[in-house]
Amino acid sequence: MDLEPLISKAKMASAGKTGGWRNYRPVVDEELCTTCGVCTEYCPEGVIVNGKIDYDFCKGCGICKEVCKQEAIRMVLE
Amino acid sequence: MQRGLQARSDKDGFRVKKLLTSNEAIAQAVKIAKPDVIAAYPITPQSPIVEKLAEMVERGELDARFVNAESEHSAMAIIHGAATAGARVFTATSSHGLAYMLEMCWWIAGSRLPAVMAVAMRSIGAPWNIHGDHLDIILLRDAGWIIGIAENAQEAFDMTLQAFYVSEEVNIPFAVGIDAFTMSHTAEVVEIWEPEIPKRRQAYTVTPGQEIAVNAVTLGKARMKARYDLALDLEKSAEVIESSDAKFGNHGGLVESYRLEDAEFAVVMAGGWCGDAKDAIDLLREEGKKIGLLRLRFLRPFPKKAIKKLKQEVLVVDRANTTIQGVLGLEVKACGLDAKNVVAGLGGLEVGVEDFYAIFKRFVEGAINEVEWFL
Amino acid sequence: MIYPGNASCQGCPISLAMRCLDEIENPVVAMPAGCSTVIAGLHPHSAMKLAVVHVPFASTPAVACGLSEGYKKLGIKANVIAWMGDGALDIGFSAFSASAMRNDDIIAIVVDNEAYMNTGNQASLSTPLGAKTTTSPMGKRIARRNVGLITLAHHANYVATATVGYIQDLRAKFRKAGKLEGFRFIHVHAPCPPGWKFPSEKTIEVARKAVMSGAWVLYEYEKGILEFSAVGKKFLEKKNRIPIAEYVRTQSRFALSDEEIARLEREIDEEIEILLRFKKPRDSNS
């Protein structure tokens, strides 16, 4: 039997390059960033590692800016 | 039935005759099929099936996990989950229980998971009624299940074993219907034997470590394709049922023909009451009336071929109705036959040999209307 | 346990909680329809780095039970997770209750965004008093059902509340649940930006204010004894709490009178009082 209609396979970008949804882009000030990892923990997308943001998928929610204790992230209009 | 019995023997030739109700016969068959997981919620008149199985599990006679569900919806959901994991599964229900679990019946069929369910066929309210008709099992008609209806306890036993084999061969769930009380609670001589059933097979299983999703939201053609595949495979399951018939009791495959060879009149029916109908046919035969019976052993796959072959005048006697007419009557008509239809025996209303004799007599006399209710 | 580029909304608490599933070994997820289904990916794609079995609403804990029973019989090691929203919990409550009482070997995780969000924000039994939804447009006039308390009354094997606002605490609870056996329930508070009407960057702040005000109490119940979680402990004392009005003001969904605000404050005290009884071992409970 054909399983194709029933089984879906895991992949990145199941909903496409969601970076295109962004209105505001989070920008990390490397001077201020201590790579403490709090933004990594709270990013709903899991697209921040060591203060580096994957803009292909970052939806620009702004949570990283809010949780950053160093205030090292600002939101810039796209 | 005797012909079937003689042809039957397992590899050791070990056969035991027991006096069993159809409920007990099904429980015995399930034990032989060795399911891994059984889940159920009791309902009259199927409860003795799962009670017996619970007993077998507790006594250590059956190495299965038995789950007491809090509803039929959950019972079907539990066996759906267990089947997804790769387990051989069984449940049983009746009436409102089947209605309550219907969502999951669609889901397990759509998921193409093998499973076996016994249905002690009982009326659905309102008003309340615990007795037999086929209104419950007919709910499964469009869900994509194989639906077998046995005539007696021996057939219930054999069909249940065949159900595990066929279901796992074609990846479609299988319901075995028996009539409420007249079969479920009526003891008959049953020959118990142990055919070999291959190990559990199924199209896919879900296990830890896989990065897959089963039954995610579909768009476009996928849903249409899945439904088409199921319809096609359900049709094709007829071949598996026919080819395994000899192994599971020689009951005739999708249909049983009774005195049809030279008949000018054919009655189409399903279920336990066919025994009484056969007696009525014998009486009419003694009077020289050329009448026979085509007993449908399966409602799905629908025995279209055998029905289309009928060249006789046809009467369908139904134990379930749509709001237009009898369900089988409608389906036989859909095969292109101009069949007469009698709806009878709802809610266990007694239809005895003499009643069948009267109905059939009017039929051969051309006195039956297109649709009639036998009240 | 979720790949980037999934369909979650901006600031979604559910995708954040889904990420934390990597704390649980050998996971298989049973998932009913809801926001999670859409986030988990539309056919032929899956966004999840694990096996997902999509199921009808009311069946979720029961399907999870079946998966778990099947794996046990076949000797397959697995942590079966019934991942639900508050909607599936409503319609599947009898299955949930039965599963808890049978002590099924599953982890039931409810990501609670306090309304049926995927279908457009209709009121659920979790929707709090005063919250406006499309089926309570003037604000719900019935209090929320406290599922944590109900599950404690089942004396379930493991019961925890968590929140996306304190992600390390949530991860620790996922981790612990993954190492235990039997029925495990984790109720995750999941503030929803579009549903609760607050900006997407405020998910964590709203979640934390729920804890700080006492609207969401964090605890774990294990081996018959309840412990309040360290991260929220100080807010058990009234003097340390922020007023509930301050939490309510973070969102535009509420329409509450002063009396109702007072009622919410009172209910927090009542909940804590009941929870305190579960701090004693069960035998001395009577």
Image: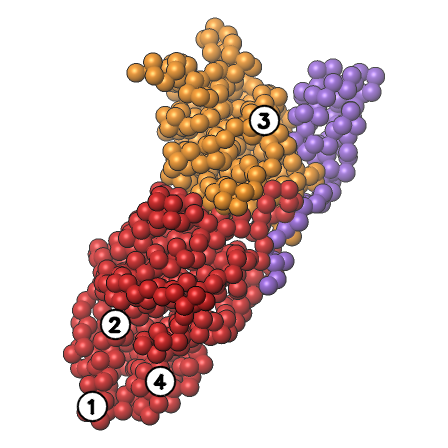
Q: Quadrant of the C terminus of chain B?
A: bottom left
Q: Are marks 4 and 2 in contact (CB under 8 Å)?
A: no
**Chain identifier of the residue bearing label 1 in the image:** B
Residue B366 image offset from top left, x and y in percent:
24, 89
Above or below for B299 versus C239: below
Q: Are marks 1 and 3 in contact (CB under 8 Å)?
A: no
Q: Mark 1 or mark 4, which is nearer to you?
A: 1
Label drawn at residue B273: 2
Real-space Cα separation, disc 3 to disc 2, in angstroms: 59 Å
Q: SS for tag 2?
A: loop
From the rendered image, report the letter of the chain displayed in red.
B
Q: Earlier in the sequence, mark 2 or mark 1?
A: 2
Q: From the viewer's side, name the closer residue of A12 and B6.
A: B6
Q: According to the image, label 4 marks what residue?
A: B338
Q: Tell me whether marks 4 and 3 sit on the same chain.
A: no
Residue B185 image offset from top left, x and y in percent:
23, 60
Q: Tell me whether marks 3 and 2 sit on the same chain.
A: no
Residue lying furthest left: B354
Real-space Cα separation, disc 4 to disc 3, in angstroms: 67 Å
Q: Are marks 2 and 1 in contact (CB under 8 Å)?
A: no
Q: According to the image, label 3 marks what residue?
A: C175
From the rendered image, report the letter of the chain displayed in purple.
A
Q: According to the image, label 1 marks what residue?
A: B286
**Chain identifier of the residue bearing label 2 in the image:** B
Question: Which residue is painted at 27% across and 91% down in the image?
Answer: B290
The 10 Å Cα crowd at callout 1, few under 14, some 14 to 19, many 20 or more, is few
From the rendered image, report the letter of the chain displayed in orange.
C
Question: Which residue is painted at 71% across and 19% down in the image?
Answer: A68
Q: SS for tag 1?
A: helix
Real-space Cα separation, disc 4 to disc 2, in angstroms: 23 Å
Residue C273 image offset from top left, x and y in percent:
38, 14
